Image (spheres, grey):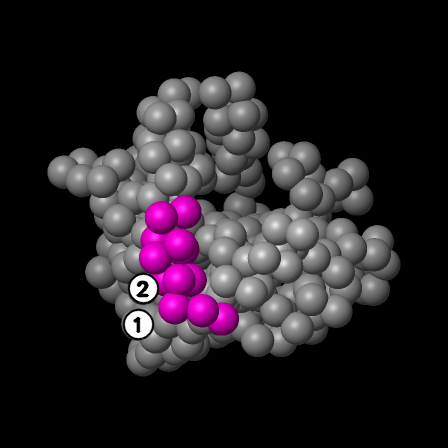
Amino acid sequence: MKRHLRAILARTPLWGPYRRLRARQEMRLVRRTYSEWTDVDERRAAFYGQFVEAGDVVFDVGANIGNRTKVFAHLGATVVAVEPQRGCGDFLEEAYGGETHVHVVRAALGASVGEADMQVSTWSALSSLSPSWIEAVRASGRHADALWTHSERVPVDTLDRLIDRYGLPTFVKIDVEGFEADVIAGLSVPVAALSMEFHSEHVAGARRWLAHLSGIADYRFQLSFGESLELTPQGWLTASEFDARLDDLPDLSWGDAYARLEGSPPHDG
């Protein structure tokens, strides 16, 4: 019923004020808890500690409201938080304004510099620059309650240009709702480790970034399902082994794929 009412409201002039009100309410709720260090934060720090340590540069691409930025900064990294959505960018700048170890980049990343249309969702974490991803998750029923109500023109930069500006990162986290392959297409130099969100109904995108990374350097790959913060027991796979693994993903599974340069050992964590 709520989704039906939102769909009706989205077709009226009241939608803009309603959306801004809801966004302000959500941000007020987040602000009240963001400064707290929780058990979930501790689990995330323990997991990402195998890729990130003090003094590293980390790119958080698709930072949203910074739940990973917070953890990377806690681990002592210099964090470049990349986020094109207006409300999320405002929140990140408010949370980290004046701090020298977090840089907020208010843009999307892609294969080349320019602009693109972002489909904006009622849930900011589902806003996307990938029409094929939105079509896939709609068809699968994964996000039955989600609405993409309008589009916004956003600036697009590249990973290579961010590296020129901020230095070579040790770790790049990419969570951009189906646009991961386009982000990776803007990278031409090896980085030690990366993560890319995946969805089982959109494996074509995963194969695109897999092919691009494999053309840059010799990487090994792993999966972590959902928010488990655990790597699967299969261990680190070659590109061809990982490509075959994508054929066996459970229906409606999702999570993050990790890539690590061969010969680059993990941190102790």
Q: Is 235 included in the stretch rendered in magenta?
A: no
In the foreground, 23 or 162:
23
Q: Amino acid at mark 1?
A: Pro
Q: Which residue is mark 2?
A: 107
Seen in the picture, residue 100 relative to 74 is either above or below; the reply is: below
Q: Are marks 2 and 1 in contact (CB under 8 Å)?
A: yes
Find disc 1 in the rendering and name its residue: 155
Instruction: Identify the secondary structure beneath mark 1.
Output: strand
Q: How far is the residue under mark 2 from the one under mark 1?
A: 5 Å
Q: In the picture provided, is 104 more to the left or to the right than 216?
A: left
Which quadrant of the structure image shows residue 75? top left
Q: Amino acid at mark 2?
A: Ala
Foreground pick, 241 / 104: 104
Answer with left or right where residue 95 lies relative to residue 139: left
First of labels 2, 1 by sequence position: 2
| Label 1: few (<14), some (14–19) or many (≥20) C-alpha neighbours in 10 Å | some
Task: Residue at 32% x, 64% y: name it.
Answer: 107
**At x 76% / y 52%, what residue is drawn?**
253
Asked if residue 21 is among those painted magenta in the image, a careful observer would answer yes
Taking the spot 67% from the left edge, 35% from the top edge, the residue there is 228
Counting from the top left corner in percent of width and height, residue 83 is at: 36, 56
Tell me the quarter of the picture where residue 241 sits.
bottom right
Mainly helix, strand or loop, the magenta region? Answer: helix
**Where does residue 237 sit, x and y in percent of width and height?**
72, 53
Residue 177 in percent (x, y) is at 55, 61
Magenta range: 11-22
Helix, strand or loop at label 2? It is loop
Q: Nearer the viewer, residue 69 or 59?
A: 69
User: Residue 181: x and y, percent?
Assistant: 55, 70
